[in-house]
Image (spheres, coloured by chain):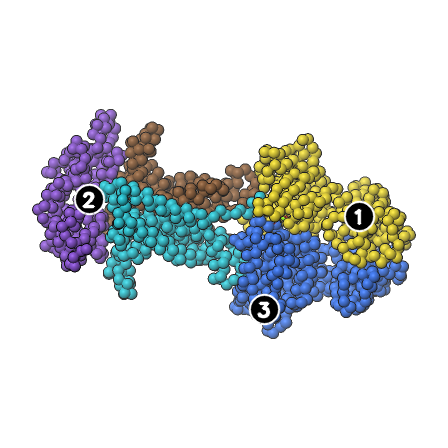
Chain colours: A yellow, B blue, C purple, D cyan, E brown
Amino acid sequence: MKTRKIIAKFKHQTERGGFCLDVDLALPTQGVSAIFGRSGAGKTSLLRAMAGLDRIANGVMQLGDEIWQNGAGFTPTHKRRIGYIFQEASLFSHLNAGENLAYAQKRAWRVEGDGAADFDMLVELLGIGGLLKRHPDQLSGGERQRVAIARALLVNPNLLLMDEPLAALDIERKNEILSYLERLRNEIKIPIIYVSHSIDEVARLADHMVVLHEGKVVAQGALAAVLSRLDLPLKLGQDIGVVIEAEITERDEKWHLARAVFNGGELWIADENDTIGVAIRMRILARDVSLAKQKIDGDSSILNGLSVEIIDIKPDEHAAMLLVQLRLGEQVLIARITAKSAAQLALEIGDDVWALVKSVSVIR
Amino acid sequence: MKTRKIIAKFKHQTERGGFCLDVDLALPTQGVSAIFGRSGAGKTSLLRAMAGLDRIANGVMQLGDEIWQNGAGFTPTHKRRIGYIFQEASLFSHLNAGENLAYAQKRAWRVEGDGAADFDMLVELLGIGGLLKRHPDQLSGGERQRVAIARALLVNPNLLLMDEPLAALDIERKNEILSYLERLRNEIKIPIIYVSHSIDEVARLADHMVVLHEGKVVAQGALAAVLSRLDLPLKLGQDIGVVIEAEITERDEKWHLARAVFNGGELWIADENDTIGVAIRMRILARDVSLAKQKIDGDSSILNGLSVEIIDIKPDEHAAMLLVQLRLGEQVLIARITAKSAAQLALEIGDDVWALVKSVSVIR
Amino acid sequence: SAPANATETLLAVAANFAKPMKQLIVKFEAQSPHKVNMTIGSSGKIYAQIINGAPFDAFFSADQEKPLKLVNEGLALKRSLYTYAIGRLVIWSPDQQKRQAEAAEGVLAKIAIANPKTAPYGAAALEAFLGIGLLPEHKDQLVYGENIAQTYQFIASGVAEFGMVALSQVIDQAKASYEIVPDDIYKPIKQDMVMLNHGQANPASVDFLNFMRSEKVADMIKNFGYK
Amino acid sequence: MEISQTDMAAIWLTLRLASTVTLLLLLIGTPMAWWLSQTRSKLKAPIAAFLALPLILPPTVIGFYLLVAMAPDGVLGQLTNGLGLGSLAFSFWGLVLASMIYSLPFVVQPLHNAFEAIGARPLEVAATLRATPIDRFFSVVMPLAKPGFISAAILGFAHTVGEFGVVLMIGGNIPYKTQVISVKIYEHVELFEYEQAHYLSVLMMGFSFVVLLGLYLLRGTKTKFGMRF
Amino acid sequence: MEISQTDMAAIWLTLRLASTVTLLLLLIGTPMAWWLSQTRSKLKAPIAAFLALPLILPPTVIGFYLLVAMAPDGVLGQLTNGLGLGSLAFSFWGLVLASMIYSLPFVVQPLHNAFEAIGARPLEVAATLRATPIDRFFSVVMPLAKPGFISAAILGFAHTVGEFGVVLMIGGNIPYKTQVISVKIYEHVELFEYEQAHYLSVLMMGFSFVVLLGLYLLRGTKTKFGMRF
Ligand SMILES: Nc1ncnc2c1ncn2[C@@H]1O[C@H](COP(=O)(O)OP(=O)(O)OP(=O)(O)O)[C@@H](O)[C@H]1O
Ligand SMILES: Nc1ncnc2c1ncn2[C@@H]1O[C@H](COP(=O)(O)OP(=O)(O)OP(=O)(O)O)[C@@H](O)[C@H]1O
Ligand SMILES: [Mg+2]
Ligand SMILES: [Mg+2]
């Protein structure tokens, strides 16, 4: 079957009953697909099957038109052009950090042109320059994980499988690596399958999202679509929100602000030295969206007003709160407001209201 | 030395140079002390030294008036009444999950009265009831971690040392365990030393905070005090904020709201079935605090107005933003606002302004 | 059941005489109330064990030297020294035809003898080969068995084409397969027995040594292939 | 073919000897191997090499030295006589001692390796769970080192059964007392009783095969980390 | 004391034999042990037990069976003659073959344990780093199994040096050709030349000690996981 998708179809019951993996996925071959799900949902199992580490009979695994598994055909792991970051420690204990990297470098897939992973740059980015002579047991947990990330990237994979790669890292380091992964996605265009418990990471990085629950796929689709659904068992609490793709059309150099325009409206957000015309992604948390019946125009630099229509109102996990689903153009926005103010404002499905979003609260 | 503190004083240079641990801590024997710091800062090293897993010459370690290490005196790990949750996998591979728990249970410290850890309750809480017959290699990463947490608690420790215990867990599970740890802190009153990269977890759980940087303590003190400092190399980004201890004085049963009064003001927040008079902790992120020159009183149910004084203005990591430190009574609040609005409002140190906080954005 | 005065004895016997000894014991036990056990080993090993306190009653050596040494060391009774057998060498080759065919082809045959250093039959065999004139020309073809039994195995298995073993070993075989070496070209292989201190008061060992000295036994031993 | 009474006695003696030696060796080899696996002493390598030396000497030579030592005026002989135990030479316990010396390296080596492979982490975990050092050894080290113990038992047992030179020298091949099966087979060969020798050999291999198979089955198939389906 | 020329030759031959045997055994023992560590076949335990059987038989008995096999009309003899190699008996390569059979279990056991202790994870990691199965074996399994290889070499080497019965049987004790040191020492003992025997024993132990010490030092002290200070 010719396709521009990553096809992963697996059905398997563990030996002594219990867990059953049953997925049928078609993921885009570009961008980041996040696998989201509770502990024990089957994320690692899925990744292992995709990598060929576990051989699931009758599974199907295709990366575009490269067929890795189909019926009896099975490409062993070492012939799949993948990079795999294991959930647990995976450094070779007989090699020091530098030798671990060299191990991958020596066996890396040859790349024409300059798409190849740059050793020095990776070492710099991951802050492991001073550690190369150390053995794994002389590294901290996060340091080991960083070496493992560098090692997986040095293989020059065509598909990156990452199992909670940043769980052990501090926020600053996390952000640096996420920026790098964003570049990888945008520039080298390697598809990434990214397992994470952190909706922050997922919202920032992913284009596509798969929600697993007890081995089954309960939702899959474009990130924005999945995140804006109110019916999923995600239990995100404070982290509920939506993602909006926009274009920078204007910059306010003095105040380091940028105007992000999208189908349905525009927002002034913090400028990141964007060039005019660049596509960006904004995350707007439900808790950061206030609603008003009239346009408030006192201080437009902090408060962006958007004209929206209420399309749904649902109770939040917490009884004091409501989740209000809003449409603006083709976008969906979610607001989390107190039930009391909803009552005071007498909000109803179908109403046209103003959604207020502070510039500081837009996450990029 | 008689003390009601946890004293931990260690100075040690690793063999081949590189890392040097140099701490001198006095932590409260009640509540949770968070150890915060970047990857490689020395958090695990500190915990190991406290547990007696690494024997650092001339160190001092005291839990109240129990002296574990002082000069030549050294209590071996198994005689220290601790529970230790390792950063990496630590289940015994020759025992299944249930046997791992039984291992701890058999050797648990005897507890008079009913302070003892409750096996069934822990198993229920951690959702590992169905996994007890499985061997560690048949568990997912998060499941293994949950078993390890239960195991450490079953020993009935007097001091709990936790090294990133929740990093591998999903948000929902995390919240459940955090609630349990809160109860442990409040009811059984075991001190907990808690290593984490997640400021969310720390802010929710910790009373005391230690910031490590390259093996040295760069800040320690009450959580609220440390979090409200603008001069620390924490790089929290969106997560900058403060923590305020308050008392519930009134409840609005209809709208599930509660009035939290603290020294310097009051806020209406989401009610969690609080009883009147209960002490609670609120976290207010800088990004959720807006500033106004005049009192805005349009919609008090969503917007809490607090009268504050500006005590400091500092540039944020991002050039578009400023961090404004505010005093209200004895509390400190931080606001993150755009430089543009700061200019429009003509904010100056010493000004009295109104800080606006939405009820939905107060994190408990 | 055994009479009240019946005892048991333990004899130490040089390996080359083990098989005849077994038959002699059967004979002895048939006519006596006593029970006889034997332990088999090389004479050197047995000697070392005796001087280190082994609980043997009598020693049947493959040479004369070791019993004498034991007497001189005060561990055995001088008057009990007795040559119970004189070994005879044979040149043996179970497959004469093959041997001759190979000799004609010029294949270098392996010639087996016992280790001349440790086994009396080996020393004698070396001497005999010199006498025949086979040595030193064919010295390179010699292979050495640890003892006379191993030498026999070399030849029997066919890895060595022929060699010198004791007549007692091949006396049951086809007459054509062996050739008795003339007595005069090697020093006689006299095998002595001796009563050890440990056994001097043991009626069984005393009786058995007397039995060994009997005329009847001497005939039997001759039939076994000794002199 | 009939199996003689002395043959039966030899089989029984052999099994008793090999089991006794294996058990005793596990008992004394375990602390030795544990020390080797834990020590950071400079003497570690020399001592480990020294423990393997009994292998180097031909069995009869070791046997000879032991015999001399066990003689009434030898080092061991004086000791055991002093203790009122009588002489070890030509006795069952003499065989036990000699076999132990000879088979020691086969027991220490696999244990040493198994202990080292465990690493420090499980012990650290156990310590935080209030396990004393002794408790840690029994509850963590021993189960994790199971394949090493089985290997040690296999090599120790098999080697003691097959041992010959030392036993012949120390034991003196005394029926019912020190005549083990290997010596008995040797005797059959010396007596040209090849058929009996084959028969005994096969019998012994059969016996031993059963014992070894049992040990191997006890060893079990280790479930592999990460082999989840 | 003077060391005779044949003694020197015997020492040299012994070292050559032990080294050759050790090397060859590592070569063939490695795939065997690897198979044992990876297979899930039901035949695993029986085969493993079978491989340990050579230990059970007294050396002279094994020697005897081998001798019969090497005879011109024996299985091996016909094979080697057919290949134009001549007879193995009384030759260096005969000794090598015999020693290999006898020492095989000592090499397979530690390797088997070491391979099993590695677990699947490092191999999985290597596979994701594009290492082929062969590559994985050399770049991951071999280094991680180092202590096992060293143990195998130590036991194999030492046991071959000390071996005696089989060698005597197959080799025919021919000076310069098949007379190894153990036989030589044995000879001295039998001849009551205790001084020479001691001297050679000590010399041999000295030599071997150096070899074993070298192997142990090569083994190194494993740094322990978690031992950070
Ligand atoms: N060998 C096995 N036998 C039985 N069940 C297994 C086996 N391996 C894994 N499981 C179960 O399969 C389920 C899925 O495991 P998996 O590791 O894929 O979860 P996960 O989504 O990665 O979880 P986590 O976030 O905790 O890492 C778990 O419930 C686990 O217990
Ligand atoms: N044996 C050792 N030799 C040299 N350096 C070591 C050794 N063990 C640890 N280190 C170094 O000490 C530093 C602190 O390690 P530690 O494990 O305490 O960090 P950490 O704060 O727990 O980090 P993480 O969040 O990544 O787990 C690290 O830089 C680490 O590389
Ligand atoms: Mg997982
Ligand atoms: Mg750490």
Q: Are dots 2 and 1 in contact, CB under 8 Å?
A: no
| Residue B65 position by quadrant | bottom right
Mark 1 belongs to which amino acid? Asp
User: What chain is tagged by disc 3?
Assistant: B
Which residue has dot 2 on it? C19
Q: Position of residue E49 (x, y in %)?
A: 40, 44
Residue drawn at point x = 23 percent, y = 41 percent? D192
Helix, strand or loop for disc 1: loop
Whole-percent x, y for residue C112 in the image:
22, 37
What residue is shown with label 1? A271
Disc 2 and disc 3 in contact, CB within 8 angstroms: no
What residue sits right under mark 3 in the picture? Answer: B111
- Separation of disc 2 and disc 3 at Cα? 78 Å
* Badge 2 and badge 3 in a common chain: no
Residue C104 visible in image: yes
- Ligand 2 near label 1 (Cβ, under 8 Å)? no
Graded by Cα atoms within 10 Å as few (under 14), some (14 to 19) or many (20 or more), the crowding at tag 2 reads many
Which is more toward the observer, A1 or A315?
Answer: A315
Question: Can residue A119 be seen in this snapshot?
Answer: no
User: Which quarter of the rendered picture does the C terminus of chain D lie within?
Assistant: top right
Residue at image point 26% right, 50% down: D6
Q: Give the vertical position of A81 relative to D164 (above or below).
A: above
